[in-house]
Image (spheres, rainbow, N blue to C red):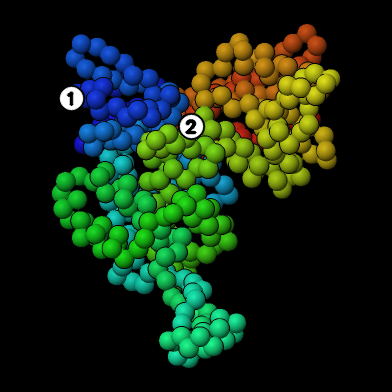
Amino acid sequence: MIHQAIEDQVTWLPGISYADIPRTWPSSLSIKVRSTGLGIEPQGVVGAVPLLNGDTIQISPKIGQVNFFRLFIAAGGMQQDLGREFEQFVSYSLEDESNIDSLVARQLLVAALDILRLSPMIGRVLRHRRGLFAAGRLDARATSFNIAAHTQDPVVFWVRERTNDIPENRVLSEAIVRAFPLLSKPDRDMLANVYQRWLARFPRSRDLGADLEHVSRGFAVGQYGGGRDYYRRALMLADVVLGNHGLGFGQGAVVEGDSALVSTADVFERYLRNVIARSHAEFGYVVSKGDSWTVSLYTDGSRRVIPDIVVSRGGSISFIADAKYKNPDSSDHYQMYAYLHVMDVEVGLLLAPSFEGNDVISRRFSSSDGKVVWEVRLPLSNFPATEAFLKQLARNFGR
């Protein structure tokens, strides 16, 4: 059974007791107790948490699944093809926010069926073989030793063999394993054969991070177009499924025991940095995280100053920004003022999501020594407005 929970909200779990809670319980999931049972409050994370009784807790983002998926794809890097593929999927397929999980899962299994019907991608792997004669590149040393020892099948050689064990197929296997339980019962009955055929034919991943990085590079160079276009849609859906399970986001993923969670604040920060970097590059701006600048609070080099986003041009900082996946408070303003003072920058932005409304809302704060901090609320229900604002940051706030 899958229990649906929402980030930063308390969800009560009927029939679940302490005996069902794994010992390696994530610290980001607070357990609540009342007379009728247990509940959880996920704090700043989404993903999946298995229970000892075989159930799974699926944690959804507070900004909604569709908006989080858009955020996640953009945060993953310069995957413009992937973004376009997802936008097309949403435009033509989405009927109801509440059914997005099962819809994506169903579409992934259907895409896997298309691959099975057409031509699955294959790779070549170099393998060491023995026989009576060489069918590839001869291993002369090993062959000479075997002949001297009168070994049966003495000829040793290297040969490239076809294999289905490639990153694309392994990524799809991992996504299909996680997608199948999200299907409705009628869809599970209808697509069970696809699930079984796929996993019987293609292996699961031994290093999912490396496999996802390979696929990401493939999207970046347009590898999945042309005759392999049917893989592009399947891999886009796999990225969505794995992102919803807290997997495939590198340092943003937190794995504790069998739980796989992803920090929504980390996804939001990477989203902002990637959108700003992509839109400002043509004007000569360099966008980086603050750790690329060697600046410290104290003269002995201790307490390094590391804003989330530094926008510079010609080696000079234009403005800085911090991502806040919450309502910014006084401590955030103090932190930003310290950044401005130490880095000798005039303008800083606190970029936070707005969880209601469709407009960008900004407020200006000025200090007596000329520092300016802007508190900006970005509507994640209106990505065109948010990204139009982010693309004009240097023009509106830079120097």
Q: Nearer the viewer, residue 393 or 31?
A: 31
Q: The C terminus appears in which quarter of the rendering?
A: top right
SS at mark 1 in the image: loop
Residue beneath the point at 29% across and 56% down: 109
* Quarter of image, res 304: top right
Crowding at label 2, few (<14), some or many (≥20) Cα neighbours within 10 Å?
Answer: some
Task: Report whether 329 appears left or right of 39.
Answer: right
Point out the residue furthest to the bottom here.
133
Q: Give the residue displayed 16% in from the left and 46% down from the top.
A: 185
Do we see residue 94 in this rendering? yes
Determine which residue is flagged by label 1.
15
Q: Residue at x 49, y 76 (%)?
A: 128
Q: How far from the left and from the top, in percent, is residue 98?
A: 28, 35
Quarter holding residue 367: top right
- Depth check, front residue: 357 or 299: 299
Residue at image location 62% in from the left, 16% down from the top: 332
Q: Nearer the viewer, residue 198 or 234?
A: 198
Residue 208 at what x, y percent from top left? 46, 51
* Amino acid type, residue under disc 1 in the picture: Gly
Q: Which quadrant of the view contains residue 1?
A: top left
**Which mark is drawn over residue 266?**
none
Q: Nearer the viewer, residue 180 or 166?
A: 166
Q: Return the x and y of residue 103 as percentages of the image width and height.
A: 29, 46
Which element type, helix, strand or loop, lies under badge 2? strand
Q: Amino acid at mark 2?
A: Ser
Q: Which residue is mark 2?
A: 263
Tell me if I can see residue 85 in this picture.
no
Q: CA distance from mark 2 to mark 1?
A: 28 Å
Measured from the top left, where is residue 81 in percent x and y?
51, 55
